[in-house]
Amino acid sequence: MTEAIDDGSRSSRYSIIEEDLVVLGKTFGLGEVQACRFLPNGLMNGNWRLETADGAFALKRIMDVPLPLARRNLAVLSELADTGIPVGRPMATPSGETVAEVADRGYCLIPWLEGGHRPGTELTLGQAGDLGVLLGQIHRSLNDERTARVLPPASELLAAPVTTPNAAHADADRFLALIAALDSPTAFDAGAARALGERKVLLDKHAHFHPGTEVAAGPVGWTHGDVQHRNVLWRDGKIAGVIDWDRIRVRPFGEEVARTASVQFGGEDGFLDLERTSAFVAGYRSVVPILVPALADAVERLWWKRMSDYWQLVFHYDRDDHSCDHLFLPAERLLAWWTARREDVQAAFAAMP
């Protein structure tokens, strides 16, 4: 039936894909699937490239959001495709469904977008600006009249919960206790313990800078939620596509600007490329005229979130999911660098278009 299911590196949770492909091929009208390759780079869902007589497609097993929410997000994607945002239009079944269910498993199918992922420091300053422009266009399109048919109006104010310094300390101590109780600690455990000790020192020194209110500065609206190098495709120096729309949610626009820059331009070397960040922010502000105080609020909130959050360790120790282990220590290096240069980082986010 298929040429290959994967490269041998997938986990057992994907073992039933070959059986599901028979049903999915009929459901979406694909006919025979000639080849199927598992894509190991996805962190939250199962992803494959399908080769069929009708062309190539991206198949996603939806595991990170409830299926009704996935259906809404796919409807948004269809609207965005009509506005010129570089996205793939979801395939629909003959009955109009964009999510096909096999047993209790949900799948969606999108025509394959050709292109490659480029870490932030590989972008030129012009391309960093282009990414900012695109993010601005996404925010405008997600909140215009067309998408209002799918997404309700966003609230003008939004609560942004702030973890207290005491709670952040308690979480660090909890993970340290878990590591200390291990019979055979690994290299990851040893590195995590060292990093947690260093984090507690940073918390002690900088706790008084934590945000004093849970009301984030505006503007607020619908956002993508994860625009960064893993979800942006480039071809011939231009942005060819934006993928992974599972996290569409109402947020302060500044929150996504700050997060995108920190993930896109804060690499494993443990620093944020401030020059590219400035170019990105200037590009964004050429489309969305967000004020500097709103960006400054978002940057400080993101810094404190990184200071007080341990999500990779939650995955590793609480969920026994090691798929994000490689992200922990680079994030710790970036946090230490950022903490020592908070004023420089703020200046980069104040860039004018």
Image: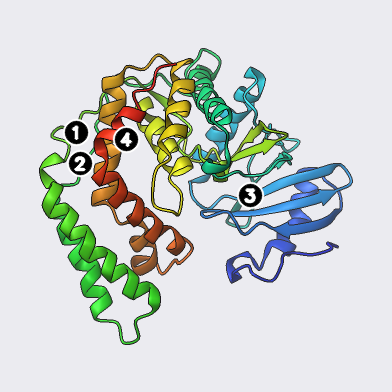
User: Is 330 on the left or on the right of 65, as rendered?
Assistant: left
Identity, as a three-letter code, of the amino acid under mark 4: Val
Whole-angstrom CA distance, mark 4 to mark 1, is 22 Å
Pick whichever of labels 1 and 3 is earlier in the sequence: 3
Q: Is residue 318 above or below residue 21?
A: below
Nearer-N-terminus badge (2/1): 2
Asked whether the residues under the numbered discs 2 and 3 touch, taking CB atoms below 8 Å apart as contact, a structural biologist would say no
Task: Identify the mark nearer the N-term, 4 or 1.
Answer: 1
Q: Are marks 2 and 1 in contact (CB under 8 Å)?
A: yes
In primary-sequence order, the first of circles 2 and 3 is 3
Q: What is the spatial separation of the Cα atoms under label 4 and label 3, in whole angstroms?
A: 36 Å
Q: CA distance from mark 2 to mark 4?
A: 21 Å
Q: Are marks 4 and 1 in contact (CB under 8 Å)?
A: no
**Sequence-wise first label, 2 or 4:** 2
Position of 216 with respect to 58 (left or right) is left
Residue 208 percent location from the top left of the image? 10, 42
- Specify the quadrant that holds the N terminus: bottom right
Where is residue 89 drawn, in percent x and y? 68, 31
Q: Amino acid at mark 1?
A: Glu
Q: Which residue corresponds to mark 3?
A: 60
Residue 220 vs residue 56: left or right? Answer: left
**Residue at position x 52%, y 55% from top?**
43
Q: Left or right of 262: which side holds 94?
A: right
Which residue does the numbered mark 2 point to in the structure image? 162
The residue carrying mark 4 is: 345
Q: Secondary structure at mark 2?
A: loop
Image depth: mark 1 or mark 3 in front: 1
Q: Residue at x 29, y 82 (%)?
A: 182
